[in-house]
Amino acid sequence: MSLKPLALFVQHDGASSRASITCQYKCGNACFHEVPNTSEGTYFGDIVADISRRRLFRGSAAAVLAVGAGSLLAACGGDEADAAEANPGTGIGTDFTPIAPNKQDAVVIPEGYEQGVVIRWGDPVLPGAPAFDFANQTAAAQAKQFGFNNDFAALLPIEGRDGSFLLVVNHEYTTEPYMFTGYTPGNPTKEQVEIALAAHGLSVVEVKGENGGGKLSPVMGQYNRRITATTEFTVTGPAAGSAFLKTAADPTGTKVLGTLNNCSGGVTPWGTVLSGEENFNQYFAGVLADPAMQAMGKRYGLGHPGAGQGEMPRRWELFDKRFDVTQEPNESHRFGYVVEVDPWDPAAAPIKHSALGRFKHEAANIYVTADGTVVAYSGDDERFEYMYKFVSSRKIEPGNTAAARKANMGILAQGTLYVAKLTGDHPDKIDGTGKAPSDKGFTGKGQWIPILETGADGKGRSLVDGMSAEEVAVFTRVAGDKAGATKMDRPEDFEANPKTGKVYVALTNNSNRGTEGKAAADEANPRNQNKSGQILELVDDHKGTAFTWSLLLVCGDPQAADTYFAGFDKSKVSPISCPDNLAFDPHGNLWISTDGNALKSNDGLFSVALEGERRGETKQFLTVPIGAETCGPVITADRVLVCVQHPGELDGHSADNPGSHWPDGGTTQPRPSVVAVWKKNGKIGV
C-alpha cells in the first residue's frame, strides 16, 4: 500500500476541528478555560489539610468481553486464521483498501462494503414510544426513545438466540440548538430541559441480524431499557454515605438521580456494561461561597461564571435546584464516577463505583489475569490529567449467569486504586518537537502509586497523607496531585489487549503542552502544543506496580517530521489525528476512532497492526459525516459498528439552518445514529 496524503495535510497550523458549539455543549468549553491542574506539590495539599481540619458539611443533610471490546471485520479462514492466532496483532485480517480523507456528508466506507443505520436519535426503544416527531417532541416520548449523541456501544449476544444481540449505548450530552428550532441559549423552556434530561444516559435495545449480511434491526424486546438523568443509581465504595454526597433530596448520600456526560465505556466478563461520567462539571451553575470547597470545585472545572451568557447555555438549574451548587453544594460530588449497568435485568438499579475514584472518566475497561484478578483501567480526559488503574482484591466468579453477575458486580467495590507516574529513557533528547529520541522510538518506565484501598465492607483506607478515604474517593484528582502523578495529554480510552495483555491509551491532544506556565514536553508527551495526540503502549504487571511503556503512534500528517508510526514506513500509512476510542479484534489488532481531527478531514475509524513487520501500519477504514465524531467502535467477524455523534455540528448552523442532512437525506434534520458496516453479499474474509 502506498498512500499520498492530501495537500491539505501538510500544514500543522490548526488545532482540533471541533466546532465551537460542540466544545460548548460537550465539555463546557474546557479547552478555553484555564487548565484545572495547577498543582505544584503543595498548593492543593494545603486545601486538603484545611478541609480535613474542618470536615466541611459533616453531619449535613470472557466471551462477552471479547465481543464488547471488538472482534474482527475482515475475518480469516484456514491457514491464515491459524497464523493470526499464533501471531496476534500482525495485521492479518485488516486487508481492506483504505479510504482517502474527505469532507463528505456521509459515512464513507471501503469498496466492497455496505452500510445501514441501526438506530437513530428518537427511534422507539420502549413499548408505547411514539414515532419520532422533531417538531413536536415531549419529555415523555424521549424517555421511551433512543437518546441523543450516542458514544460508547456494546453488542452482547443473547444466549440461545442466534443472530440476536443486546445493543447498549451511552448518550453523552445534548446539543439543544440542534434539537429544537428557535432555541434560545440561556433561556430554555421547562419542556426542553426535561427532554434533554431524558435524552442523556444509556439505551439498551435488542437488535436482530439478518442471514447473509451484517444489517441489524431494533426489536421491541424484553431487555429494552432507557436510563436517563433522572434514573435512580446506587453508590458503592468509600464515598457512599459520605457527608460530601449528602443532599436535601438524599440525606443518606447513597442514592443519586441520573448519570451525566456518559462518554466511552467497557464490557465486563460477567456481562455488565461500564460507562464513564466525563464532563459533568458543565451542568452545574453557581460558585460556592466557601473558599476551600470553591478551590476543590475549580480543580474539576466547576464554578465558571457566565451562566446563560454562553458558558452554561442549558440552564437546568432554572427548573431543578440540584444543578445550582449554591442551593445544593454537594450535588456535583455525586457525578464523575464509573457506572455499572446490568443490561440483562431491566429492573436492576445501576451502580456508581466510588472505589474507582471520581474524575472525568472517559471509560473503564477490564483485564482479568490468569489467577482471576480483575483490573480496571481508566483515564481522566482533560489536559494534564492522570492515568489510573484499580486492582480488585476479589477473584472473578466464572460464568455469565445471573448469580455470577450479582457476585461479580461487587468486584469493583473492593480493592486498591492507583495513579501512574512515568519516566522516560531519553530525557535529555526530548525538546518538544516530537522527534523520536532513539531508533526504538519513545520508551520509558512507570510506577503505579497506590492512593486508596477499599475493603469488603465498602469502607476505605486512604494511602495519601493528609486526606481521608472519602476525600480521596471524591477528590481523586487532588490525591493524584499529592502522589506526584504524571500529567498526560488528555488520557481517554484505556484498554488492555485481550490477546497479548499489553495496555493501550489514547492521548487525544493538548495544545497547552509546553506553553507559558504549563508542563513542558516529556517523553510520553513529546510535542509542545500537541494538536494530534498519540497512542501509548504499556507492558504492565497488571496486579503489581511496575510497567514499561513506549509510544506506538505520534499522530498527525505522515509527511510531517513530528509524527511516528512505530518505525513503519510513513509513506504507507493513513493520516490520523486526535485518537479517542480504542477496540481490539480477536486477532489482536488495534482499532482507533478519532474526535476533532486537526488535519481538516472528517473523523474516522482506523486499524493498526501492533506486532511484526507491519507494526505501526495505520489504515483508515471509514469516515463519518461532516461535523461528526466517530465513537463506540465494535468490530466483529460479521460487521463493524460505529456511533456517529453530533453530525452537522458546524459553527453558524443549528436546527434552524442544518449543517447536515445525514442520515435520512433530503431536507431532514441530522440525527446521531449507530451505523453497521459489512462486506457485500455477506462474504466474510479477505
Image (cartoon, rainbow, N blue to C red):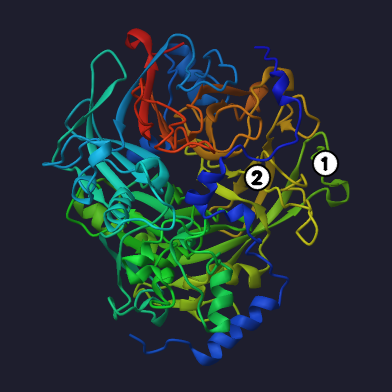
Taking the image as shown, residue 481 lies to the left or right of residue 285, namely right
Q: What is the quadrant of residue 112 in the picture?
A: top left
Q: Quadrant of residue 20?
A: top right
Q: Which mark is residue 433?
A: 1
- Please state which amino acid type lies under the numbered disc 1: Thr
From the viewer's perspective, tell me whether residue 282 is left or right of residue 16: left
Q: Earlier in the sequence, mark 2 or mark 1?
A: 1
Q: Is residue 548 left or right of residue 455?
A: right
- Return the residue nearer the eye: 562 or 529: 529
Residue 384 % position (x, y): 66, 57
Residue positioned 45% across, 62% down in the render? 336
Q: Residue at x 23, y 36 (%)?
A: 133
Residue at image point 54% right, 33% down: 592
Q: Nearer the viewer, residue 460 or 131?
A: 131
Q: Which residue type does callout 2 highlight?
A: Asn
- Residue 175 seen by the camera: no
